[in-house]
Image: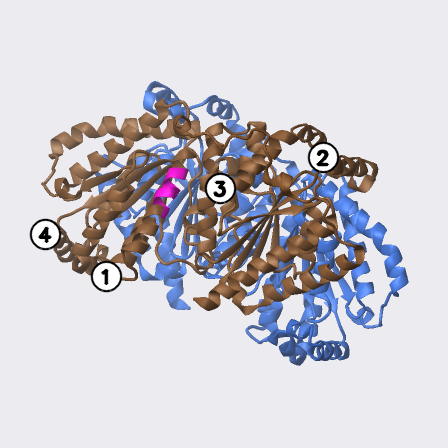
Chain colours: A brown, B blue
Amino acid sequence: MFESAEIGHAIDDDTYEAALPSLREALLEAQIDLHEQAKRQIIVLINGIEGAGKGETVKLLSEWMDPRLIEVRTFDQQTDEELAHPPVWRYWRQLPAKGRMGIFFGNWYSQMLQGRVHGQYKDAVLDQAISGAERLEKMLCDEGALIFKFWFHLSKKQMKLRLKTLKDDPLHSWRISPLDWQQSKTYDKFVRFGERVLRRTSRDYAPWHVIEGVDANYRSLTVGRLLLEGMQAALNKVEPESSALTIGPLAIHNNERTLLDSLDLSLHLSKEDYQHELIAEQARLSGNLRDKRMKSHALVAVFEGNDAAGKGGAIRRVAAALDPRQYAIVPIAAPTQDERAQPYLWRFWRQIPARGKFTIFDRSWYGRVLVERVEGFCSESDWKRAYAEINDFEEQLTEAGVVVVKFWLAIDEQTQLERFQEREKIPFKRYKITEDDWRNRKKWPDYRQAVGDMVDRTSTEIAPWTLIEANDKRWARVKVLRTINEALEKAFARDKKK
Amino acid sequence: MFESAEIGHAIDDDTYEAALPSLREALLEAQIDLHEQAKRQIIVLINGIEGAGKGETVKLLSEWMDPRLIEVRTFDQQTDEELAHPPVWRYWRQLPAKGRMGIFFGNWYSQMLQGRVHGQYKDAVLDQAISGAERLEKMLCDEGALIFKFWFHLSKKQMKLRLKTLKDDPLHSWRISPLDWQQSKTYDKFVRFGERVLRRTSRDYAPWHVIEGVDANYRSLTVGRLLLEGMQAALNKVEPESSALTIGPLAIHNNERTLLDSLDLSLHLSKEDYQHELIAEQARLSGNLRDKRMKSHALVAVFEGNDAAGKGGAIRRVAAALDPRQYAIVPIAAPTQDERAQPYLWRFWRQIPARGKFTIFDRSWYGRVLVERVEGFCSESDWKRAYAEINDFEEQLTEAGVVVVKFWLAIDEQTQLERFQEREKIPFKRYKITEDDWRNRKKWPDYRQAVGDMVDRTSTEIAPWTLIEANDKRWARVKVLRTINEALEKAFARDKKK
């Protein structure tokens, strides 16, 4: 994989100087056009051997293009806020907005390589990291991002020579970090695992480019030209490429019985049983969240359901059990301008709780496969690929110890009608009922199908859906609380086994 | 100040239960109306004696109102990211958006009181913190925020009783933190300094409310009613109150000579001197930013100037000296939707560099007293109070070790005309010239006056303006770099003296 990057590629100064002006102009133009279009963020990953010109190249790119549209990010030590969140959170928070360029030094690849080279784990864990990176990049590209991955290479001999030269140069000796010296000892391992990573993560939508780092003219022009080519190609595509052609059909629904039909909506609780059980479950939740084992977890509860199914009331009963300093409630409405300038999941990543905390989502990322699907706010390929993206997202949460609980509050059409009419009568609840609600109601069968597909495809062993029979509000509230408690206690029990 | 909060206010259960439903309904309605209006954020500060019902009251508020529009924030230990920024940064990052409510536990008041009670500093420093809080709150209110400040009080005897009761109650003993016990020892000091703080920071726009904490019915109803009254009053005002009536005139300009006239725009550098000096200053800057003393500072450079004065070119020459990992360039354009839902300075606080880092603002918070003033994008009272707000903002930066350098790049009208015409000719620079530029040009005298006022009122000893003669780009670029270097070296020298 690295062979052709050890053969001494070089470009002489005259050729370089001659090629530069038009390249710079074209790069700048492409950058500005992409900025005006504001449909894609450009993500440039910089990896490879120390001393192979990574820093110099990034510096050149900032000179050639408009540096005001470029963000250079380094990911060294994690901050304590980053350590309290799933590992990938730090990258999400630094994503450039659409139209801008983010250059990521020390990205997910350096993190996985360092861990493997220093023996913190074996190939199996490296492979997990690799497939995580693959899925992340696929999702970003599907959302319009343009990803360039550059691996700067030097042969072992060249690297040693380079470090020696730098050391002897008083003007540049500061450039060599302890890391560089360390790498000279681990070169063989670094290259071996690097090959594995490159092989597994070079994909059509985000291929690796191996750049021979010895000759500055060669590496600069090569990187510049690759960037230009990619940016121009992206500009010439009117829409971000869609994988629509390769999207398979969902299960066929011939009006057959779905999970929702199998719910017994007559389930209910008497007032006395409710009072009793509600208080018991609230005390249990309060205890669970104060449990010291909670320190290695976070809790995410997702509330979806039919309009007027009682999401708000159920959320209030959950919150009532708790110290308001422990939880946050995030109501999800139409995305803001800043949120639209990012991949779909970005706004949810922003709200993921730190360890020990609890976030309640009143509607959620499932909007994509519910309202956005039914109302046509996104393309078919967007919502069809969302199932897998959401499963990946939730896997990243649960792997970091986040307990994910998801509720669909189900009522029947008649109950909804009664509640709508009741809301219209009470002045104080009138804000809860809008034209939209009446309109949505007409799409009942569409939503029913969307919910069925959603549960089929995203109810997983790590983050199962719980369908709540919500015709009786009391029954629903107690079941919600009990489900959260059981999920937390199951997570605590698993901790013990480890 | 606390006397009337030690006389045993109480409300019996029947009265409480009778008053509650209409209070809750009215609170909810006011909350929803303010949310729909989306013109003000509601900030509730919770302070006072431990055990006086702070937590319980906040919990009630979340139950009474729609908790989805409420964010409860605690400010305990600073995270390492917070420690790397000016102290007030942690509050700015947690401000609720307009239309939402933020309840701040452990806010700026608790921070200043803890420090004083535990003898970390004397009254003089406390008074500085007090006046900082006052200015912050005044600015937030002027920007539309609604601030409620509640001090929950208990007499010493009552506090001890309360802690004892809690301790003996197995269901509640977990509620007592070590901090509570500590406070029982420092009660007298806490109350004495608390009085000083309350006296100095109770202002018409954000008064303190002292709440006797013994009786839960009394304190809950009182807080609820105060909130309701304040929220309703705010709703009844069509516009956030303006201090326009009390705003004095600026200096009268009778076309007299301004600072801008005193600039010698013929200053220039030969090509050879430029090459030589540019490289020298760039090397000096690169060295300064690598200096280990930089670790206790951050650097902020503000670039303002006439259109086509060469801001972009100067910024690129500064950036060219540096490792792209060290700096960020922030171009300031029209605010986004999320930014408009916050006080004016919020978007700049977000971009303030952490210690050791450098942020370049390409246009800045001075937009308020330049383009917004000239174009009428904000009211007269808004831009007139902005001078003092900006000085406060920069003081908070410099006190935290941030070096603030501000440039006005000045050219004359003829030079601007030539550069506009030149830009229109070169295809590659054409994006730089728009209709807006030609229109702005007609407002030359207005901008000239705005710049004069700006420099008069915001060129301070801690963050002076540097006017750059920019008819000659070479001269301008070298002067910019030299000014930054001198500012950094002055800051380093001051460190030594300490």
Q: Position of residue B95 (x, y in %)?
A: 60, 50
Dominant secondary structure, magenta: helix
Residue denoted by label 4: A157
Residue A178 circle label: 1
Say if B143 sits above or below A482 in the image. above
Residue denoted by label 3: A345
The amino acid pointed to by label 3 is: Leu
**Label 4: how many residues lie within 10 Å, few (<14), some (14-19) or many (20+)?**
few
**Distance of mark 3 from mark 4, alpha carbons?**
44 Å
**Label 1: how many residues lie within 10 Å, few (<14), some (14-19) or many (20+)?**
few
Task: Inspect the magenta stretch and tell me whether residue A384 lies in it.
Answer: no
Residue A413 circle label: 2
The amino acid pointed to by label 1 is: Pro
Q: Earlier in the sequence, mark 2 or mark 4?
A: 4
Examine the rendering and report whether any part of residue B241 can be seen: no
- Say which element carries label 2: helix
Q: Earlier in the sequence, mark 3 or mark 4?
A: 4
Q: Earlier in the sequence, mark 2 or mark 1?
A: 1
**Distance of mark 2 from mark 4, alpha carbons?**
74 Å
The amino acid pointed to by label 4 is: Lys
The residue nearer to you, when weighing B50 against B302, is B50
The residue nearer to you, when weighing A217 against B372, is A217
